[in-house]
Structure formats: C-alpha cells, structure tokens
Amino acid sequence: MPIANYQASAYKQTRVKTAGPGQLVVMLYDEAIRQLEAAAELLEKNTKQLDQVNNAILKTRDIITELMVSLDMENGGDFAQTMFSLYLWFNEQLLEANLKKESRSVRIIAQQLTQIRDAWSQIAGTTNVQPQERSGVNIAG
C-alpha cells in the first residue's frame, strides 16, 4: 500500500474512532451518498463495469441496514419507527434500482439521503455527546 493511501486510511480510522454518535451517523450517510453517486455516474456512462455499480449499491444497503439496527426502538418512539420504515423502503428501492440498473432511482435516493444527512449534521453540531465503543459497518476502510 502506498504511503499516501496508508496515511489517508489511518486518518479516516482515527476520525471514525473519535467521532461522537451523531457525527458517526453523518459519516455513514456521507459514505452512502458517495457510493450512490458513484453508482449513478457509472450507470449514466453506460459502463460495462456493472460489478462496481452492484458493489456500490450493496455497500449503501449495508450502511442503511447498519443505520436500521442502530435505532433505539425501545426509547425512540415514533421517530425510531418512522426511520426504520424509511430505511426499509430505501433498501427495497435500492434492490429494485440495482436489478434494473436505473440511475434515476439511485439519484433520487441519494437526494433523499442527503436531506436526512443534512438534518443529522445540524443535530450532531448542536449536541455534545462523547464517543463510545462501538461495532458495525467499517466505513474507515
């Protein structure tokens, strides 16, 4: 691994490990959006690299699943239930978009995730919660 890649990976890992819960959610959304935009670009170029499209969409579905399982269904009330339903819908739409290789659907989901991400970013910027030990999807690389 070239030194620049190693340094970038180390920085990303440190950033993830020191992030608060709200910041981590924003980082998950950032990665999901980045993956979907990459998939949409490849689809719009009529690429033959459908394996890369598939991998990007699958990674996004994994991230959304991680967001689903991180919901506090016991204490989250209607918000947690609504987000759970929304995440289920996103995963269903991504499955269909992946099967049909539709960039339009992928872009729409990316836009919707961006709106939710922006809301989480505002929340994360106004709360002061310390990072804690966690496991789940490795977005650090």
Image (spheres, rainbow, N blue to C red):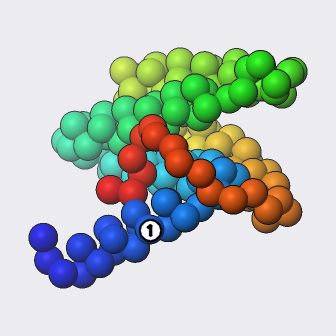
Horizontal placement of 97 versus 29: left or right? left
Horizontal placement of 79 versus 14: left or right? right
Residue that appears at 19% across and 42% down: 48
Residue 51 in percent (x, y) is at: 22, 37
Give the quadrant of the N terminus. Answer: bottom left
Observer-nearest residue: 124 or 107?
124
Residue that appears at 66% across and 51% down: 21
Where is residue 60, by image quadrant?
A: top left
Q: Secondary structure at mark 1?
A: helix
Can residue 122 be seen here? The reply is no
Observer-nearest residue: 61 or 42?
61
Residue 67 in percent (x, y) is at: 59, 34
The residue beneath circle 1 is: 14
Where is residue 113, by image quadrant?
A: top right
Observer-nearest residue: 5 or 88?
5
On screen, residue 84 above or below 36? above
Horizontal placement of 42 versus 106: left or right? left
Residue that appears at 69% across and 59% down: 130
Horizontal placement of 83 versus 8: left or right? right
Residue 15 in percent (x, y) is at: 50, 67
Q: Residue furthest left?
A: 1
Amino acid of disc 1: Thr
Can residue 58 be seen here? The reply is yes
Residue that appears at 60% across and 27% down: 68
On screen, residue 32 above or below 50? below
How many numbered discs? 1
Other residues around mark 1 within 10 Å, as few (<14) / some (14–19) / many (≥20): few
Give the quadrant of the C terminus. Answer: bottom left
